Image: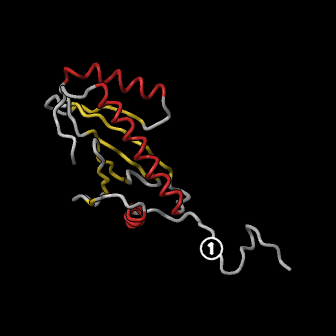
């Protein structure tokens, strides 16, 4: 009688999950399975709105899947020092997400959180679900920390 195991799954058992290429269609199916609210923007990127942040699912280059969140609030350069300290502290004491600031021409300062995953081998559905949920939770944690440090003086609403 043959042994059941990784090489010989029992008859009728689902096939083992294998990594397959990730694209927007798989991301949409994933967020639907996770029962997350989402939208698709004009550039075709999936967006996942949370209370303080919208997380975008991006494919910035060959073989990379990225989640990038931008805090809804915006700051002036007068808050730059405090935001820099927050970002430096966050990046020095946590493994993710990567926190960074951008400054637009008008002196508008934005806080971002970002996580990335190499896609060369693809992802199973379970890996994709874990990456999206964990990445979103990490980004939301960063933005909640910013809300604690800067609850009112910054412009912008909290609802998507």
What colour scheme does the image use?
secondary structure
Q: Residue furthest right?
A: 1
Position of 31 with respect to 156 (left or right) is right
Q: Name the residue: 43% across, 43% down.
A: 115
Q: Residues within 10 Å of mark 1 (few under 14, many from 20)?
A: few
Q: Is residue 64 above or below residue 124?
A: above
Q: Picture quarter containing residue 79?
A: top left
Q: Name the residue: 31% across, 28% down.
A: 148
Query: Residue 153, percent across and down?
Result: 18, 25
Position of 123 with respect to 16 (left or right) is left
Q: Name the residue: 40% across, 47% down.
A: 136
Q: Nearer the viewer, residue 43 or 67?
A: 67
Q: Where is mark 1, residue-wise?
A: 15
Q: Is residue 47 above or below residue 5?
A: above
Q: Is residue 68 above or below residue 106?
A: below
Q: Nearer the viewer, residue 14 or 105?
A: 14
Q: Picture quarter containing residue 71?
A: top left
Quadrant (top left, top right, bottom left, bottom right) of the N terminus: bottom right
Q: Name the residue: 28% across, 19% down.
A: 81
Query: Residue 110, percent across and down?
Result: 25, 34
Q: Picture quarter containing residue 154?
A: top left
Q: Nearer the viewer, residue 78 or 64?
A: 78
SS label for mark 1? loop
């Amino acid at each position: 009688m043959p042994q059941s195991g990784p090489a010989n799954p029992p008859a009728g058992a689902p096939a083992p999950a294998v990594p397959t290429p990730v694209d927007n269609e798989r991301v949409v199916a994933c967020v639907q399975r996770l029962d997350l609210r989402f939208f698709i923007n004009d550039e075709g990127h999936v967006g996942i709105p949370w209370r303080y942040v919208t997380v975008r699912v991006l494919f910035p280059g060959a073989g990379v899947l990225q989640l990038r969140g931008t805090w809804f609030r915006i700051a002036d350069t007068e808050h730059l020092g405090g935001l820099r300290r927050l970002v430096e502290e966050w990046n020095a004491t946590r493994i993710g997400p990567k926190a960074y600031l951008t400054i637009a021409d008008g002196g508008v300062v934005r806080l971002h959180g970002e996580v990335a995953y190499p896609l060369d081998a693809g992802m199973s559905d379970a890996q994709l679900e874990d990456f999206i949920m964990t990445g979103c939770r990490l980004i939301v944690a960063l933005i909640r920390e910013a809300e604690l440090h800067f609850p009112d003086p910054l412009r912008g609403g909290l609802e998507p």
